[in-house]
Image (tube, rainbow, N blue to C red):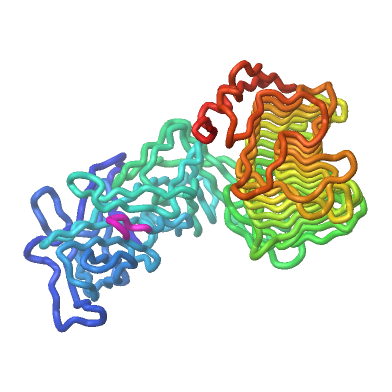
Amino acid sequence: MKNIFPAAVCVLCAATVISCGKESAPVTDGEPVVDGRVYVEFNASLQNGAEVSPESKTSLSGKSVLWSENDAVAVFSQASANGAGERFDAVSVNGKSAVFGGNIVPSDTYYALYPYQESAVCSDGMIKAELPVGQTAVEDGFADNTNLAAAVSSEDAMIFRNLCSVVKFTLSEECPTFVSAGIRGANDEPIAGDVTVTMLASEDGIPVMTVDAGGSPSVTLSGNMSAGRTYCFVLAPVTMKDGFELFFTDSEGHRYTLTGHNPLILERSGIISLQTITPEADGSVAITDEAGLRNWFESLSEDPSSTAVLERDITLDGNWTPAAENGFTGLLDGNGKVISGLDVSVSSDFAGLFASVMAGGMVRDLTLEIVGVETSSATGSAGAIAGFSLGTIENCVVRSVSGMATVSAPTYSGGIVGNNSLRVTGCTVVNVNVTASGSAGASGGICGVNHGKIENCNVASSVFSATGLAGNAGAVAGHNSRLSEAFSGYISGCSVSDAEVSAVNAGILVGTNEGSGYIAGIYASSASNSVVSGLSGRTSRIGGLVGYASRSETADCHTDNVAVGNDVSAGSIGGLVGYSYNSSVYGCSAVSLELAGSVAGDGGKGALAGYNGGMQGSGIISSYYLFKEGADAAGVVGTGSAPVSHCIDGSTGNYQDLVSGVPDFADAFGNVWKASVIWAGISCRIK
């Protein structure tokens, strides 16, 4: 472990360094070993200004940290190819100084990283490494593998500089013994995880560490933490501009929190002391293992409004029974953690992690790695999070454990939720096969049927099918409609890539988009590199965005490299909408489009719509298409007499026709769409 020498509380400091002076420069001994490497040793010293004297490997605000006999560093030779570093172990440790030795290709310049990480690699003066998200609680210090330091050498010196910041706290005498602690910024600033150390980040060559995209917004300490003792988090140097939260768990699973509202400025090589703190119990349950997760879910039958927070990733062993059959009304905070191995197979109406989430219930910041979720009930609905939701699901990810996971139900089947009647936002579905088998079943990437809001969600590399005579499938939702003012049928800001969709009513975004007397909407969404097809032997309505649209709105939606249709006979095939009746399509596009298959009866095939009928909607306005090179062409619309205006073929049309004299479009939700804004950055793609 690393112990910090006792000293007065301090706030932030300038960097201090370790160096090798001329009298202690790296030396070689013996003949070259494998791949031209030779044995090298160097001494570690602390440099104070121009004076070099033996000291410790690092100093934080004047607190020295001792070398240990098991210390090792990674050294990267600039004379060899970029890649993994060589391990240099402590040859001798004497008080505050140490000698390190190892084999390396000789070079005038070396980079080095403490502590040694086998996975660390160097490329073009940048080291990819890891600042641990899970750290071990140590009294008056921090664990061996946490406080990263880096060095750039010259011919006669190797100077380590601290990369991290330390936040220390002392538990008051009123605190129980805690078994874990965590810290998170109010804005979820990334503070640990995969990092990049830029070795020559400034004119004086001081290395700088940044957290890579996708870094963790929280760091946890594990181990018994006693009242009256001091402990430390080691974090990346960031600014938590709106404050932070500390959270603790006692041995009985009770959770305690403390919130700081002032900015927390973490600077490299500095310590911030939060002084003595007394976190307060917040009434929630901290979940740290599978047993705790199962126990909490079982308790929901008596207290469906309970709150729980995941403190660690959890792997499930064996089948899962959906919780809250009568509806979950509390909060599950995934805290950015992962539940893997979810495997649900039931005969009840609702299948998922939860059976149902009711009004007031919320599931957020959770990643589910699923094996399969299914119900055999003839009226059943399935979703990885829940079969039915009248609550809020936000910032959740559903993906497979390995290969393609499955979600299936006769009625409504969705990657996130079977039937959504309130709100799903910021969610992602990857590598999932979603199937609805009932006669009018609905299958979708986010939900099977949507009567609420779906916003800013992403679906990728997944398959969606509805096999019934009147089935609906879409990579966002199988069926979308607005039942009343409270249930909006609103889809916005979603993206789809590499999806396969098939059903009687099939669209890459939505299978069926209808109003049931009201207006449903799909706004500002996109689809790419996907395929949508009908079902063999059945008259199908197939569209690049929507399969069947009735009394609905679709605005500012775009497809790129989407194949619409297949060899079976279809009722209507359209690049944007298969069958559009009394509906509006405004400011949409189909680029690199392919249309396939034949149409039957009075159906049609068109670049924008297979059928465009009715007089209550405004028809298709300010939209364009561009067929893929070598693909069979088709007219703008197959059949139907509803209006089509300001629409062009992208290979021959004039961009100005898309925007000149085009009226604004006001939708049922109060949004106003302007063609000039939609097409502002796309004129270069159109002749």
* In magenta stretch: residue 126: yes
Majority SS type along the magenta span: strand
- Relative placement, left or right, of 180 versus 13 is right
Q: Position of residue 258 (x, y in %)?
A: 52, 39
* In magenta stretch: residue 263: no
Q: Where is residue 199 in the image (x, y as percent from the top left)?
A: 26, 53
The segment highlighted magenta reads 123-128
- Relative placement, left or right, of 308 versus 355 is left
Residue at the extreme left? 23
Q: Residue 257: in sight, yes or no?
A: yes
- Relative placement, left or right, of 460 versus 452 is left
What residue is rendered at 47% in x and 44% in y? 172
Where the N terminus falls, by quadrant? Answer: bottom left
Residue 377 appears in which quarter of the rendering?
bottom right
389 or 94: nearer the eye? 389
> Vertically, is 311 above or below 22?
above
Q: Position of residue 600 (x, y in %)?
A: 87, 45
What residue is rendered at 57% in x and 49% in y? 336
Q: Position of residue 613 (x, y in %)?
A: 83, 29
Residue 193 appears in which quarter of the rendering?
bottom left
> Vertically, is 545 above or below 111?
above
121 or 183: nearer the eye? 121
